[in-house]
Image (spheres, grey):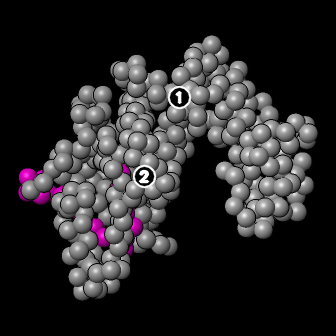
Amino acid sequence: MWTRVSAAAVPVADRFEWFNDLVASALIPTAIKSERSADFQAEAALLDLGALQVSTFAHSPLSSRRTPALIRRGDPEQYQLALITGGRWWMSHRGGDEEFGVGDMILWDTSRPQETVAHPGDGPNRSIILHLPKDALPLRPDRVDRLLGRRIATDSGMAAVLAQFISSLGEHGSACAPQELRRLGSVAVDLAAACLAHRLDAYGELPAEARERALRERIDAFIEHNLGDPQLAPGLIAAAHGISVRSLHALFRGREESVSAAVRRRRLERARADLARADLAGRPVHEIAARWCFTNAPAFSRAFRAAYALSPTEFRRAAAAGARVPR
């Protein structure tokens, strides 16, 4: 589960020094300055995924500098990959300057100097950071060097899949069991490696197992994003990922359900969530079913009852009354 800490529990006069110590122990030793040190606000959380750690930070505007002396003081020998979820940022790292903001990712090497500025914005500066051991990434260091301190847009491809995964960790990681967290750690390493490899045009250098796991995650994300498309079927999914339908089914062979069954289950889950929404209470059940590609009302009702032991109408009534409903 997430280990959370907040400056709110620290006396105001000690908060900035507390945050400095927190960053040094949870992330890397760095010299931090802030024009708002007298009323500094911050909170952080750390999640252990076994293969790597994930940290989240929210804080007042600041600047930081990691010098050779601070590197000698403490170096976890990691690549740290941040997804920015709040504020505007600037970084100087490995000879380049880069500005980036909400939705962007940026990678740095803890063994190299850097300078960062978190600018004031509408709210706190926020980030979710993957702590990637260098020896966990199956990419040559000289290749990874090309990406250090460079803005990584997350609007398409593997970067979009990785950013969505990181966001989900931040939102749902606390609900996962230890064995699930260990699996998520392996997935995080594979997705990060695949994302960086795509940026470097070096995807073929990844081990076959890592490529396969990353492909499965891409397919899962594609399915999730396209559940409302009535054309979503194995043929479309396979074509979108440049593989044959046979290869797609082979990827799902070790799972508990087929491709079509996975799509059907996820559509039922979306319909169930909509039926529980108070703002959709006036929308007929058959419209909600059709939204998730169930065009035959009796068939939807049978599938829903088989999955949740209640009819759609019974489920909606129970959810509206605040009763405990099946998930």
- Left of 183 or right of it: where is 95? left
Where's residue 10, x and y in %? Answer: 28, 81
Q: Nearer the viewer, residue 83 or 180?
A: 180
Q: Which residues are magenta?
A: 54-72
Q: Are marks 2 and 1 in contact (CB under 8 Å)?
A: no
Of callouts 2 and 1, the N-terminal one:
2
> Which residue was labeled with disc 2?
83
Amino acid type at image mark 1: Arg
Q: Nearer the viewer, residue 233 or 163?
A: 233
Q: Which mark is residue 36?
A: none
Where's residue 135, x and y in %? Answer: 23, 33
Mark 2–mark 1 Cα distance, whole angstroms, equals 22 Å
Instruction: Find numbered disc 2 in the image and state the secondary structure of the residue it sits on.
Output: strand
Residue shown at 63%/13% (left/top)?
Answer: 246
Of the two numbered discs 2 and 1 in the rendering, the one whose residue sits closer to the viewer? 1
Residue shown at 47%/23% (left/top)?
Answer: 212
Amino acid type at image mark 2: Leu
Question: For residue 280, which quarter of the picture?
Answer: bottom right
Please say whether residue 182 is visible from this viewpoint: yes
Question: For residue 156, which quarter of the picture?
Answer: top right
- Say whether residue 63 is magenta: yes
- Left of 268 or right of it: where is 256? left
Instruction: Find numbered disc 1 in the image and state the secondary structure of the residue it sits on.
Output: helix
> Which residue was labeled with disc 1?
216
